[in-house]
């Protein structure tokens, strides 16, 4: 298909439709409302389910219900709305049904504002809901990548019977770029729904989907199964991109929009003779810790740049284990740092670790 | 279940419902959940929909209902069964879907979900068991606890000045246009049990005919947390609960009435 001009939010919704989503349940919240609006128009056209729920609490539980039925299902929200969904997310994680969520992050905490931010990193990767679980978290840096990751999200959700969250900041949601949509996939037929799904106990034992295990041993058994699955995901599904890391003696680490801004920083810094590379995590969970540890042995220092007060940097430091200095630069409240803001921070790090020599 | 050979000249008129599993329930002696489970199971059998039915269990005493109904079931978060049922039924419109909820679940923490499901006319059936108390957590004040009723969290009796009044859910939901059939019944004596079963059957028929949302509220007992014997609990419910929660239909759409009258 040819490239078209797509707004991020609409592109995410359309990509989900192309990926065969059968139902969307959601609630309006800026800066992701266009996801809901696109679904509201397109789903009836495709003969699929769209429902505007009474709250994010309801929408995530509608997702839970449809997922139990074995349908491909999705919801979308922005930071405060995703906070409201955490209860349902925990239930879905324990019940091991597949679901896809989008979080178009805005400034916080609290009501915050509607500017782009990355303040939900902790919530996304550390799991704000109760209990031991992780969601697969995919962080696009462009609209094309958002489209591709939405399609991937449904496949990963089905493959591992898990929640996959697309986590993008408001600028990805709101900006427009040329992008190519995937071809339309056929929607799964009712008779193709999984054998574990609630489809009626015809000619088989009744299926039960629950997150309640009253016995401690049984609950631990479920936790061990979940942990084993998470381990498998961590082994198979880590994704990241590198730019100019081959000869780098300094490393930038940034995700989403910041990862994109940092590509410019790499170019400008190299023009000044600073040999810097960039690692952009695409999966925030599982985190590319092994690769970062490897690069930590190569470079003299790392600068993590985020649109928050310093969240992913904690995981970077855990990966680096003190092998090289790890600095942080971030802005909050919806301010997007520009290359001119980041470059001086990189120069400071270069001066500190002696990586600034022009060869 | 142990089967009995029925002689050729005899007809079986009573048996164990297919829609119930042979499990022993965890319910307290004298609790009416068992009665209500059986009524639902009999109705599912009579309508021939067991293999096409999906139930959503609540959080509360009936949290383990999925072990007792021999139909596909999911366990919801507290109060969220109507949202789950909505999501599920919308992608499985040919299935028979029901939620089974208690008073804390439906009338307190999940009130938004049930009100909106009813208002949208979601095509599922809710069985709402009202026993005026939080049973599973050990007898705290419920949204339907009566004025003056002593519970572990209203030790001097429910004070309506500070705790507000008991919620009359059948009246509230019956006022919504999306609700096709809403009724309040009681399982406190044989006659009431028979009426409750008819109501449950009509509620499921309402769903099968695609008429809209249906709910049967059922006045029930909790001998354990009321600190009464089973029979005294039945009497207490008749005297006090039915006085505040009058029995009868609060919504009978034309379609449901036609069903009831066999038209």
Image (cartoon, coloured by chain):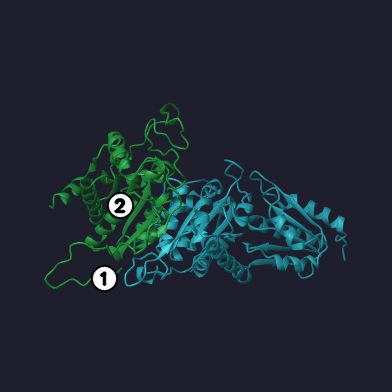
Which secondary structure lies at badge 2? helix
The reply to whether residue B175 is visible in this rendering is: no
Q: Nearer the viewer, residue A327 or A92?
A: A92
**Dot 2 and dot 1 within a common chain:** yes
Name the residue that disc number 2 marks.
Answer: B36
- A86 left or right of A38? right
Rendered view: B187 above or below A258: above
- Say which chain is cyan: A
Q: Nearer the viewer, residue A117 or B258?
A: B258
Is the Cβ of the residue at disc 2 closer than 8 Å to that at disc 1?
A: no
User: Label 1, on which residue?
Assistant: B3
Residue beneath the point at 43% across and 43% down: B134
**Pick the front one: A229 or A112:** A229
Q: Measured from the top left, where is residue A300 in percent x and y?
A: 83, 62
Q: Within the image, what quadrant is residue A148 found in? A: bottom right
Q: Who is closer to the viewer here, A71 or A13? A: A71
x%, y% of residue B110? 42, 45
* Label 2, residues with CA under 10 Å away: few <14, some 14-19, many ≥20: many
Tell me where residue B132 appears, x and y as whole percent. Answer: 37, 40
Q: Is B92 left, or right, of B13 in this rendering? A: right
Q: Please determine whether, in this image, residue B172 is positioned above or below residue B136.
A: above
Residue A344 got which mark?
none
Q: Residue at x 30, y 42 (%)?
A: B234
Chain letter of the residue carrying label 1: B
């Amino acid at each position: 298909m040819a490239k078209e001009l797509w707004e991020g939010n609409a592109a995410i919704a359309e990509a989900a439709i192309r990926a065969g989503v059968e139902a969307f349940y959601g609630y309006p919240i800026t800066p992701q409302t266009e996801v809901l609006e696109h679904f509201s128009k397109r789903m009836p056209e495709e003969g699929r389910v769209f429902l505007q729920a009474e709250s994010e609490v309801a929408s995530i539980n509608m997702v839970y219900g449809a997922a139990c039925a074995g349908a491909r299902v999705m919801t979308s929200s922005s930071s405060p709305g995703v906070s409201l969904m955490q209860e349902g997310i925990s239930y879905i994680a324990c019940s091991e049904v597949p679901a896809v969520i989008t979080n178009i992050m805005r400034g916080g905490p609290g009501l915050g504002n509607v500017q782009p931010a990355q303040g939900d990193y902790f919530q996304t990767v550390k799991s704000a809901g109760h209990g031991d679980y992780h969601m697969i978290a995919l962080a696009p840096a462009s609209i094309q990548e958002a489209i591709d990751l939405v399609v991937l999200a449904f496949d990963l959700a089905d493959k591992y019977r898990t929640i996959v969250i697309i986590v993008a900041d408001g600028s990805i949601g709101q900006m427009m770029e040329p992008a190519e949509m995937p071809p339309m996939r056929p929607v799964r037929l009712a008779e193709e729904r999984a054998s574990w799904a609630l489809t009626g106990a015809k000619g088989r034992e009744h299926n039960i989907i629950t997150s309640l295990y009253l016995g401690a041993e049984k609950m631990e058994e479920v936790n061990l199964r979940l942990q084993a699955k998470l381990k498998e995901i961590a082994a198979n599904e880590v994704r990241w991109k590198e730019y100019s890391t081959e000869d780098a003696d300094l490393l930038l680490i940034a995700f989403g929009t910041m990862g994109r801004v940092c590509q410019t920083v790499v170019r400008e810094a190299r023009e000044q003779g600073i040999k810097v590379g960039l690692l952009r995590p695409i999966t925030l969970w599982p985190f590319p810790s092994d690769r970062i540890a490897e690069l930590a042995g190569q470079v003299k220092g790392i600068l993590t740049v985020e649109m928050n007060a310093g969240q992913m940097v904690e995981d970077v430091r855990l990966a680096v284990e003190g092998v090289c200095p790890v600095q942080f630069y971030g802005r909050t409240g919806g301010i997007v740092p520009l290359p001119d803001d980041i470059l001086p921070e990189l120069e400071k790090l270069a001066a500190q670790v002696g990586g600034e020599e022009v060869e | 279940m142990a089967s009995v050979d029925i002689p050729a000249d005899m007809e079986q008129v009573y048996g164990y419902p297919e829609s119930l599993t042979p499990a022993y329930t965890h319910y307290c002696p004298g609790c009416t959940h068992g009665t209500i489970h059986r009524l639902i199971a009999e109705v599912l059998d009579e309508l021939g929909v067991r293999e096409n039915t999906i139930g959503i269990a609540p959080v509360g005493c009936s949290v383990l209902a999925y072990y007792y109904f021999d139909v596909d079931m999911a366990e919801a978060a507290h109060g969220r069964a109507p949202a789950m049922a909505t999501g599920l039924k919308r992608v499985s419109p040919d299935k028979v879907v029901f939620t089974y909820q208690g008073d804390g679940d439906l009338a307190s923490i999940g009130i938004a979900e049930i009100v909106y499901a009813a208002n949208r006319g979601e095509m599922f059936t809710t069985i709402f068991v009202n026993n005026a108390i939080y049973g599973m957590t050990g007898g705290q004040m419920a949204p339907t606890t009566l004025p003056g009723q002593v519970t572990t969290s209203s030790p001097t009796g429910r004070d309506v000045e500070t705790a507000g009044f008991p919620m009359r859910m059948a009246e509230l939901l019956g006022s919504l246009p999306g609700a096709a059939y809403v009724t309040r019944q009681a399982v406190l004596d044989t006659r009431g049990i028979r009426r409750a079963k008819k109501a449950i059957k009509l509620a499921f028929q309402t769903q099968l005919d695609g008429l809209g949302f249906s709910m049967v509220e059922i006045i029930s007992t909790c001998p354990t947390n009321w600190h009464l014997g089973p029979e005294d609990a039945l009497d207490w419910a008749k005297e006090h609960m039915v006085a505040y929660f009058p029995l009868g239909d609060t919504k009978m759409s034309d379609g449901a009435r036609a069903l009831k009258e066999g038209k």
